[in-house]
Image (cartoon, rainbow, N blue to C red):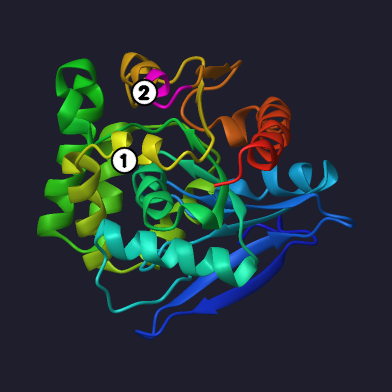
Amino acid sequence: MFNLFGNLLSTTVDRPDGTRLALLTAEAPRPEGRVLAVHGFTGGKEDFLFLLPELAAKGWAGSSVDLRGVHQSTSTGPYDLDTLAADLVAVTHDLGAPVHLVAHSFGGLVAQRAVIVDPAAFASLTLICSGPAGFMASADLVPVTIDRVTRFARELAAHDLAQAWDAKTAYENVDMHPALASFLRERFVAGTHAAAVRNVEALLDASDVVEELAATGVPCAVLYGEHDGTWSQVTQNDMAVRLGTVPIAIPEATHLPMLENIDATAEVLDTFFRRAETLTEAEPR
């Protein structure tokens, strides 16, 4: 296991159905607001372990959460998007709503629904390398993504998490440090098979709820790495227009700008959070 957690605090939030959600938190001495970060498919709360301290240094107390059935968040289900969204709303109230919600990739599909369910619980929503609907809605724009995700879905349908992960890493053939590769595998395998299957189905086929999201009036931002191609930038740009915002490309980054260019991502988020706070004060919902 990496020794990267520093002063991050590990906590849990319990749900009525027995689900226990695991969080990492970086406190700020005199917080100006609170942030909740949500990972993408095959990700986890550790995807924000470098970003959270940077945000705390700028005055934003920050937490990241494992979705139910992922890594250290235990649950017997269900794992549909609406249930995952209800979990986020519950965590938000536990932390002290309203919070600035930051969601990466698949997490964006969950986060959109959370904001729609309880807009008052959220000071803003930032979608990082995410989209308005599942990949199949824009399949012609992301053939490589569709190939990888559908192949992984087939592996999950036929094998356990370890076997599916090993097959995935074999055909994707991504070069990374052995210790990182080991951690990512252990994190994924620690999850629940049924959650992974349900998540990948939603990642492919989730419906578009952007109009409902826009109608909430919650300030939204759309960010992506300048070289990100997992979700089409055409699709993300269109989503930004529908949400009344201008997309921001994080330089020197692909699909994980919160890990690939931490300083730039933190700066963009800090600026957006401050603007969102002003908008909320000027136009209370």
Residue 2 in the image: above or below residue 14: above
Position of residue 268 in the picture relative to residue 195 (left or right): right
Mark 1, secondary structure of its residue: helix
Residue 142 in the image: above or below residue 185: above
Question: What is the magenta range?
Answer: 240-244
x and y, in percent, of residue 51 in the image? 68, 42
In reply to whether residue 241 is colored magenta, the answer given is: yes
Q: Few, some or many C-alpha atoms within 10 Å of disc 1 (few <14, some 14-19, many ≥20)?
A: some
Mark 2, secondary structure of its residue: helix
Q: Which residue is mark 2?
A: 242
x and y, in percent, of residue 58 in the image? 82, 41
Q: How many marks?
A: 2
Please indicate, yes or no, whether residue 147 appears anywhere in the rendered image. no
Q: Main secondary structure of the magenta part?
A: helix
Give residue 192's quadrant in the image: bottom left
Position of residue 7 in the picture relative to residue 4 (left or right): right
> At x 39% / y 16%, what residue is drawn?
237
Point out the residue furthest to the right here: 29
Q: Amino acid at mark 2?
A: Arg
Identify the mark nearer the N-term, 1 or 2.
Answer: 1
Q: Which residue is mark 1?
A: 212
Q: Amino acid at mark 1?
A: Glu
